[in-house]
Image (cartoon, helix red, strand yellow):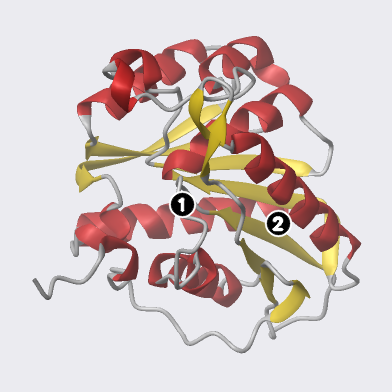
Amino acid sequence: MNEIPRFLRPFVAEHPDLPSPVAVAPNLDLYLPDAVSGPHPVVLLVHGGPIPDDFAPTPRAWPVYIGYAALLRAAGVAAAVVDHRYHVVDGPDGPTVDAVTAAADVAAAVEALRAHPDVAGDRVVLWAFSGAGLLCADWLRDRPAWLRAIFLSYPLLASPAPHLPAEDRLHLDPRFAPIDAVAGAGADAPPIVLTRAGRERPLLAGFVAAFVAAAAAAPLEIIDVPDGQHSFDVLDDTGESRAALHAAVARAVAVLEDGH
């Protein structure tokens, strides 16, 4: 009865404390490194969902995103966390995952960050977790020049609706189809770094396998966590988990600093 909710469980890796964030927008926190002067390349951490619209605390305060932001900042790049409106709403065909609004919120956060004087607007990594993996379809299709890489941690990469009983289905705008998007992206796609949990839920694992197969021509890198669960970075307090998340952070920093 006293079990800590998953979203409030501690990050499995030790990290330095974060300073107070720069409030770029009401839903967007920016953490700037203090070792060197800017402008700094930035990683935008994009939480999963859907979550209730009155959920508290909001993802910007969850230990998992604070942990990743702290590690990125300590490595010398800026990190940002956005609260986006990835909620379930009433649609014409029934309950709908409002990925359209969530994607618009993320796009607005990117533009706000790129306009900030302490951010290098041409060096941005988008890092999606869990259900936010669906949003990467837009990024794979558009491939803006400022997008240096797409990071995906235990992502949802297809709508589970067809696999659910009719009464449990949530509708989703068909544009959010990462498997189709990555198949059409080819070698000119931004680098994609996928952190794959070996003990992922079977349905999500199947979508990940389909995404990997569709990405045969794309620049895809995989960081495997063989014994990791979905949300291994808060659920599995192991050396394997820490090694995987540190590898992903290091790769994000390398992409931003080296440009490839």
- In the picture, measured across the screen, residue 48 lies left or right of residue 154, that is right
Observer-nearest of 235 and 82: 82
Nearest to the observer: residue 135 or residue 140? 135
Res. 36 image quadrant = bottom right
Report the residue marked by disc 1: 248
Write the residue at 59% across / 36% down.
Answer: 99
- The x, y position of residue 6, in whole percent, is 27, 62
Q: Could you say which quadrant of the image residue 201 lies in? A: top left
List the single residue furthest toward the left. 1
Identified at 66% across, 82% down, the residue is: 21
The residue carrying mark 2 is: 257
Kindly identify the amino acid type of the residue bearing the numbered disc 2.
Answer: Glu
Image quarter hosting the N terminus: bottom left
Name the spot of residue 109 as percent of width and height, x first: 75, 56
Tell me how far mark 1 sits from mark 2, CA to CA: 14 Å
Q: Residue at x 40, y 15 (%)?
A: 210
**From the viewer's perspective, is residue 180 above or below residue 56?**
above
Q: Earlier in the sequence, mark 1 or mark 2?
A: 1
Vertical placement of 187 versus 95: above or below? Answer: above
Quarter of the image with the C terminus is top right
Q: Secondary structure at mark 2?
A: helix
